[in-house]
Amino acid sequence: MKFFLDTANLEELRKGAEWGIVDGVTTNPSLIAKEGKPIKEQIAAICDIVDGPISAEVVAVTAKDMIREGRELAKVHKNVVVKVPLIRDGIEACSALSKEGIRVNVTLCFSAGQALLAAKAGATYISPFVGRLDDIGANGMDLIRQIVAIYDNYDFETQVLAASLRGPAHVIESALAGAHVGTMPFKVMDMLFSHPLTDKGLEQFLKDHAKAFGN
Ligand code: E4P
């Protein structure tokens, strides 16, 4: 499973890039707004840090405007993937942009039926939101499993990008379900490192080594 960072924060991206485990980045209008810079400027800066697919989301809501905005965003860098919401106009824009060779990530997916629409429209990625489904008492991970199964049945090339992952368990379950990508906040990626037995084991190794050979 590929690891994407779900952030527009350059410091977090630099840290993730240093670890060498970040395959790409997803952003959304809320994450861009948090950084306070215009989207094209922020996306260009992100592309300088991470060499992989970088999702940049349109804020237009009509197909015509989404296509125009998507084309502009795609010009920022060859790694830009245009993100559109899963509404009728978004699917129309996805079809048009995909036909032009622009990669599209269809976001705000909350049902398998919606995921089918995105695949039919030639999306490169579909983004089902696990955490937000859990928040309303549904089972977000069931949706990942359904979409992976449906796409497998028909050999759709659209990749399942498990989004809105809130903790390590979501990441592990997405990988078990066969999601192609998991996008996660920096905090969640950082949490994947932690295990008390790792810390305890390392402490003991270093202590034993120092006792025998000095520091
Ligand atoms: C995905 O692309 C979204 O940016 C993101 O995963 C949403 O996560 P949230 O529900 O934690 O805001």
Image (cartoon, rainbow, N blue to C red):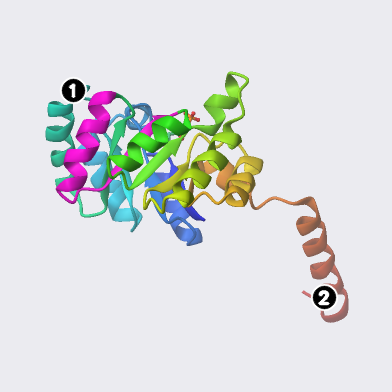
Please say whether residue 211 is one of the residues in the magenta stretch. Answer: no
Q: Position of residue 35 (x, y in %)?
A: 34, 32
Q: Position of residue 133 (x, y in %)?
A: 55, 25
Q: N-terminal of the two: label 2 or label 1?
A: 1
69 with respect to 176 (left or right): left
Q: Quadrant of the C terminus?
A: bottom right
Amino acid type at image mark 1? Thr
**In-front residue for pair 186/169:** 169
**In-front residue for pair 154/98:** 154
What residue do we see at 45% from left, 55% from top? Answer: 22
93 with respect to 87 (left or right): left
Tell me if mark 1 has few (under 14), some (14-19) or many (20+) residues whose alpha carbon lies within 10 angstroms of its own.
some
For ligand 1, give the image quadrant.
Answer: top left
Residue at image mark 1: 62
Q: Tell which residue pokes out farthest to the front in this image.
A: 153
**In-front residue for pair 194/109:** 109
Q: CA distance from mark 2 to mark 1?
A: 65 Å
What range of the chain is rendered magenta? 88-109
What residue do we see at 45% from left, 47% from top? Answer: 151
Q: Tell which residue pokes out farthest to the top in this image.
A: 136
Q: Nearer the viewer, mark 2 or mark 1?
A: 1
Number of marks in the rendered image: 2
Please say whether residue 98 is one of the residues in the magenta stretch. Answer: yes
Where disc 1 sits, the SS reads loop
Residue at image mark 2: 209
Q: Position of residue 29 (x, y in %)?
A: 32, 28
**In-front residue for pair 184/108:** 108
Amino acid type at image mark 2? His
6 with respect to 207 (left or right): left
Q: Position of residue 7 (x, y in %)?
A: 42, 39
Tell me if mark 2 has few (under 14), some (14-19) or many (20+) residues whose alpha carbon lies within 10 angstroms of its own.
few
